[in-house]
């Protein structure tokens, strides 16, 4: 699932919509949260 987030972030970031920037920030927070969750649930070197 996390693999799709960067692609969607790129699409949103390129979107001229005035709300695109706020949504992009929310996605960055979501990605960080998912990475932290995965780090604790299943550590990968």
Image (cartoon, grey):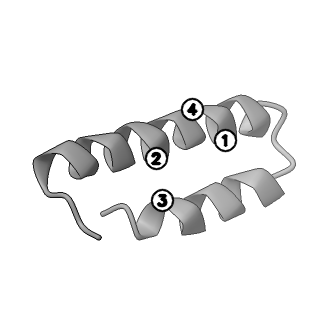
**Which badge, 4 or 2, is on the more N-terminal residue?**
4
Q: CA distance from mark 1 to mark 4?
A: 5 Å
> Of callouts 2 and 1, which one flags the residue occurring earlier in the amino acid sequence?
1
Dots 2, 1 in contact, CB < 8 A: no
* Whole-number angstrom distance, CA of label 3 to CA of label 2: 7 Å
Residue with the most extreme front position: 45
Provide the secondary structure element on which disc 3 rests. helix
Q: Residues within 10 Å of mark 3 (few under 14, many from 20)?
A: some
Q: Quadrant of residue 42?
A: bottom left
At a point 68% along the width and 62% down the height, the residue shown is 11
Question: Which residue bears the numbered disc 1?
Answer: 24
Q: Residue 16, how many percent across, how many down?
A: 87, 49
Question: Percent position (x, y) of residue 35?
Answer: 36, 49
Q: Earlier in the sequence, mark 3 or mark 2?
A: 3
Label 1 Cα crowd, 10 Å radius (few <14 / some 14-19 / many 20+): some
Viewport quadrant of the N terminus? bottom left
Which residue corresponds to mark 4? 26
Write down the quadrant of residue 36 in the picture: top left
Mark in the foreground, 3 or 2: 2
Q: Residue at x 69, y 53 (%)?
A: 12
Question: Is disc 3 in contact with disc 2, using a CB cutoff of under 8 Å?
Answer: yes
Left of 23 or right of it: where is 42? left
Q: Could you give the CA–CA distance between mark 2 and mark 1, rounded to whole angstroms?
A: 10 Å
* Left or right of 26, for residue 11: right
Q: Using the rendered view, name the quadrant where residue 7 is placed.
A: bottom right
Say which residue label 3 marks.
Answer: 5
Q: Which residue is mark 2?
A: 31
Q: N-terminal of the two: label 3 or label 4?
A: 3
Q: Nearer the viewer, residue 33 or 10?
A: 33
Q: Nearer the viewer, residue 2 or 15?
A: 2
- Tell me whether the residue at label 3 lies in contact with that at label 1, contact meaning CB atoms closer than 8 angstroms: no
């Amino acid at each position: 699932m996390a693999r799709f987030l960067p692609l969607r972030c790129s699409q949103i970031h390129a979107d001229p919509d005035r709300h695109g920037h706020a949504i992009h920030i929310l996605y960055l927070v979501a990605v960080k949260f998912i990475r932290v969750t995965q780090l604790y649930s299943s550590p990968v070197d």
